Image (tube, helix red, strand yellow):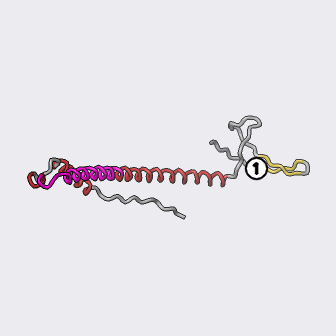
Amino acid sequence: MELYKAEVRKYKKGKYDQWSIPISKGHSFEDKEEVVVGKLEDITHLEAEVEDLKKTNNQLNIEVKEVLKKLTVATDIISKQKDLISTQDKVLAIYMNRGIFSRLRNPIPKDMKMLEDNREKLIQLEDSRPLVIELPGRES
């Protein structure tokens, strides 16, 4: 957007007042081209608003990236917990289906490896710090 500075001039044409805005050499306007005319203060105000909007947009983009990172970590933790719960359910079902004599003769279940894997997963979940996702509040 190119801006040109000029002074408004008032003159009488018959009974009515008219205004003209003469623009010096070097402009890029064509004959009978429509242009928008505004006060310098208004244009300066609009430019300031555009800068504020750019800053706000950048800040929002940063906040969105942070929230997405937290959401990704939370989703990962939830999937690990679901996997852990399903594995524990399987082991419990296998153990419960064993008879009393089978439990007495062989107290260690065949799927002990699965339980050890679950122990490692539990340690990983304990090491995961709890997430606090803060949503930015509206400022009035």
Residue furthest left in the image: 105
Give the camera-side residue of 67 and 54. 67
Reply yes or no: does residue 106 show up in magenta. Answer: no
Instruction: Classify the position of the N terminus by image quarter.
Output: top right
From the viewer's perspective, tell me whether residue 27 is left or right of residue 112: right
The spot of residue 100 in percent (x, y) is: 14, 55
**What residue is shown at x 71% (from left), y 47% (from top)?**
37
The spot of residue 103 in percent (x, y) is: 12, 54
The spot of residue 29 in percent (x, y) is: 71, 37
The spot of residue 106 in percent (x, y) is: 10, 51
Query: Residue flagged by tag 1: what amino acid is it?
Result: Val
Circle 1 packing at 10 Å, graded few (<14), some (14-19), many (20+), is few
Q: Secondary structure at mark 1?
A: loop
**What residue is shown at x 78% (from left), y 49% (from top)?**
9
| Residue where numbered disc 1 is placed | 8
The majority secondary structure of the magenta stretch comes to: helix
| Number of marks in picture | 1
Q: Which residues are magenta?
A: 75-101
